[in-house]
Amino acid sequence: MSDLPQQPPQSPKSKPSKVTLMKATNLAFEFGFIFALPLVAFGYLGKYLDKKYGTHFIVLIAIILAILSSSFWFYRRISSIVKDLNNSK
C-alpha cells in the first residue's frame, strides 16, 4: 500500500439551492419596487399638481421627495436584512 494519506472524494461544486436563488431574485424585484413605486407615484402627483396650479416646480419637489422616501425605505430594508443575518449566526 502507499504511504500517502487517503483524502475523501471531493464532491463537485454545488450549485446554489433553488431557495437561495429565489431569495436573491425576490430581493432584486423588491429593491426595484422600492425605487420605482415612489418615483412613479410622486411623479404623477407632481405632474397633476403642476397642471392643476399652472406651475412647473412641483414635479421637481415631488421627485426629490420620491428619492428621499426611496432611500429611507431602502435603508430600512437593508438594515432589517443585516439584522436578520447577524441574528442567524
Image (cartoon, rainbow, N blue to C red):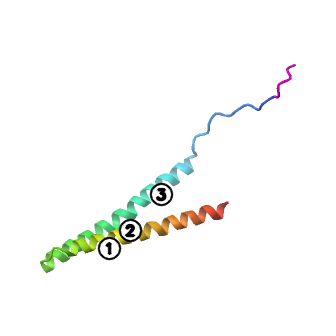
Up the image or down, 58 lies above or below 35; here it is below
**Of helix, strand and loop, which one carries label 1?**
helix
Q: Nearer the viewer, mark 2 or mark 3?
A: 2
Up the image or down, 48 lies above or below 85; here it is below
* Mark sitting on residue 27: 3
Magenta span: predominant SS is loop
Question: Where's residue 83, x and y in %?
Answer: 59, 66
Furthest toward the top, the residue is 1
Towards the viewer: 60 or 48:
60
In the rendered structure, which amino acid carries the disc numbered 2? Ser
Towards the viewer: 12 or 71:
71
* Mark sitting on residue 65: 1
Up the image or down, 35 lies above or below 7; here it is below
User: Looking at the figure, which quarter contains the C terminus?
Assistant: bottom right
Q: Residues within 10 Å of mark 1 (few under 14, many from 20)?
A: some
Span shown in magenta: 1-5
Q: Please name the residue shown 42% across and 60% down the image.
A: 31
Q: Is residue 23 magenta?
A: no
Q: Please name the residue shown 55% across and 47% down the image.
A: 18
Q: Please name the residue shown 19% across and 77% down the image.
A: 49
Question: Where's residue 32, x and y in %?
Answer: 39, 59
Q: Which residue is mark 2?
A: 70
Q: Is residue 2 left or right of residue 81?
A: right
In the rendered structure, which amino acid carries the disc numbered 3? Leu
